Amino acid sequence: MSRKILIADDEQHILDTVRAYLENAGLQVVVARDGREALFTYRHEQPDLVILDVMMPEMDGWDAARLIRKESDVPIIFLTARVDDFDKITGLEIGADEYITKPFSPRVLVAHVRAVLRRAYGDLSSEPTVWRVGDLELNAETRLVTKGGQRVDLTPSEFDLLAVLIARPDRVFTRMELLERVQGEAFAGYERTIDVHVKNLRAKIEDDPRQPQFIETVYGVGYRMRSHHE
């Protein structure tokens, strides 16, 4: 089953990057931009794990975590730019499960999230996440893609692009959104590189790339994975 993660940080680029990596890992993600919003979102979404930046407006991560801890023993990971012992001790006293110092690698953060989920929930969180659309199947854990039971060899960028699309069938993604999720950052002027990735991906998964049944172009917007095929 897919676990739900709450990430709270006042830096939009961190929210976007972490969200992209967690979703590519098969996890559901909800976000908040300050401590008060984090507390509100936690109470309404009931996530399986909370990632809190320490320094946030309105209410800092410490106070948000203390209030969450009064209601739940949900796993909490703190993000901080500070590395002194006081912060670490404070986090441990509140009941932090992990403590990650900025700047950090999104892939390392995902590994920490998986480890905390395994400790907290056991085997449920370590089950492979598999998506299927028609005869196309993607396994996020093994990074294996098959079509009609036959393995499809993809580049890392092609795999990440397919993972984003197949995890949210019928959801339209702009080129900039896809670029952010595939590369971890997006720059205006580079979004057309997504067109190249889509063209290469279609050549590998479509019976007829000129009449795609999986990845549909939404003209003027971007692309989507069709959930039903003719």
Image (tube, helix red, strand yellow):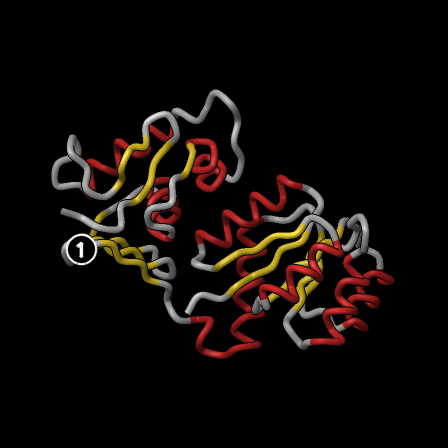
Task: Please give the name of the residue rendered at 26% of the width and 33% of the height, measured from the top-left corner.
Answer: 200
Check the image and name the residue furthest to the bottom.
122
**Does 33 sit left or right of 137 as displayed?**
right
Disc 1 marks a residue whose amino acid type is: Asp
| Residue 223 image offset from top left, x and y in percent | 34, 36
Measured along the vertical axis of the image, is residue 14 above or below residue 60? above
Instruction: Point out the image quarter for the N terminus.
Output: bottom left
Q: Quadrant location of residue 133?
A: bottom left
* Residue under label 1: 135
SS of the residue under disc 1? loop
Task: Please give the name of the residue rendered at 37% of the width and 67% of the height, measured from the top-left corner.
Answer: 128
**Does 17 sit left or right of 196 as displayed?**
right
Identify which residue, 190 or 84, lies in the foreground. 190
| Residue 71 image offset from top left, x and y in percent | 71, 76
Q: Residues within 10 Å of mark 1 (few under 14, many from 20)?
A: few
Identify which residue, 155 or 60, lies in the foreground. 60
- Report the number of discs: 1
Task: Please give the name of the residue rendered at 37% of the width and 58% of the height, measured from the top-left corner.
Answer: 140
